[in-house]
Amino acid sequence: MVGRISGNYNFMNVYTGGYSAAMNAGRADTAQKTVVNPGESVTVSPGRKSSPAQCQTCKNRKYQDGSDEMVSFKSAAHISPESSAARVMAHEQEHVSNAYSKAAKADGKVVSASVSLKTAICPECGRSYVAGGTTSTQIKYPNEKNPYSQNKKNLDAISLIGSNLDIAV
């Protein structure tokens, strides 16, 4: 037979020298790690180091914004993997809102605004989470005083003359 016979049996008791060593040896493989993420699964997936409930990486993961805008997450803060998608999307929407405010102040127009979220898999427990996001915005500002833009408008107007001709007979 291979393996331990019972939970309190210690075949190394002769060498360890006493009762306490025997009790610790019997509990070593049955003791569970401490739960650092309450409410999560305690099942360890194959090929992973820990379960989601015991994952130190997920517990210590922090998010921080690197832009020069006044938005949330300027100082590093923790977000749970379950709420990371909603919180990161809300943060990226702050950037979109700032773009609309910036365009309104200078008589501009937001041509496009897109948000992309990046996902990742925790190497310790295998849980997926939103790792960050990127916001891309394009704002078009009118520039009536620029002579090049005036010439471009005039050329566009000349090229369009007569392109839509309706003749009724």
Image: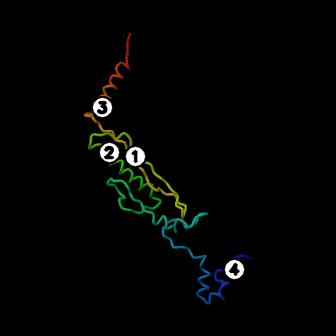
Q: Are marks 4 and 3 in contact (CB under 8 Å)?
A: no
Q: Earlier in the sequence, mark 2 or mark 3?
A: 2
Q: Amino acid at mark 4?
A: Ile
Determine whether the residue tagged by mark 2 lies in a helix, strand or loop: helix
| Mark 3 neighbour class, 10 Å CA radius: few under 14, some 14 to 19, many 20 or more | few
Q: Residue at x 32, y 24 (%)?
A: 157
Residue toward you, 27 or 98? 98
Give the Cα distance between marks 3 and 1: 27 Å
Q: Position of residue 45 (x, y in %)?
A: 59, 63
Work out which residue is located at the far right of the displayed protein and give it.
1
Q: Is residue 128 above or below residue 168?
A: below
| Mark 2 neighbour class, 10 Å CA radius: few under 14, some 14 to 19, many 20 or more | some
Give the Cα distance between marks 1 and 4: 63 Å
Instruction: Check residue 136 in the rendering and tell me which mark sits there, or answer none.
Output: 1
Residue toward you, 71 or 54? 71
From the image, tell me which residue sits under label 2: 100
Give the Cα distance between marks 2 and 3: 26 Å
Q: Amino acid at mark 1?
A: Ser
Work out which residue is located at the far front of the displayed protein and give it.
148
Q: Amino acid at mark 2?
A: Tyr
Q: How many marks?
A: 4
Determine whether the residue tagged by mark 4 lies in a helix, strand or loop: loop
Residue toward you, 17 or 149? 149
User: Between tags 3 and 1, which lies in front?
Assistant: 3
From the image, tell me which residue sits under label 4: 5
Q: Quadrant of the C terminus?
A: top left
Determine whether the residue tagged by mark 3 lies in a helix, strand or loop: helix
Q: Earlier in the sequence, mark 2 or mark 4?
A: 4
Q: Earlier in the sequence, mark 4 or mark 3?
A: 4
| Mark 4 neighbour class, 10 Å CA radius: few under 14, some 14 to 19, many 20 or more | few
From the image, tell me which residue sits under label 3: 148
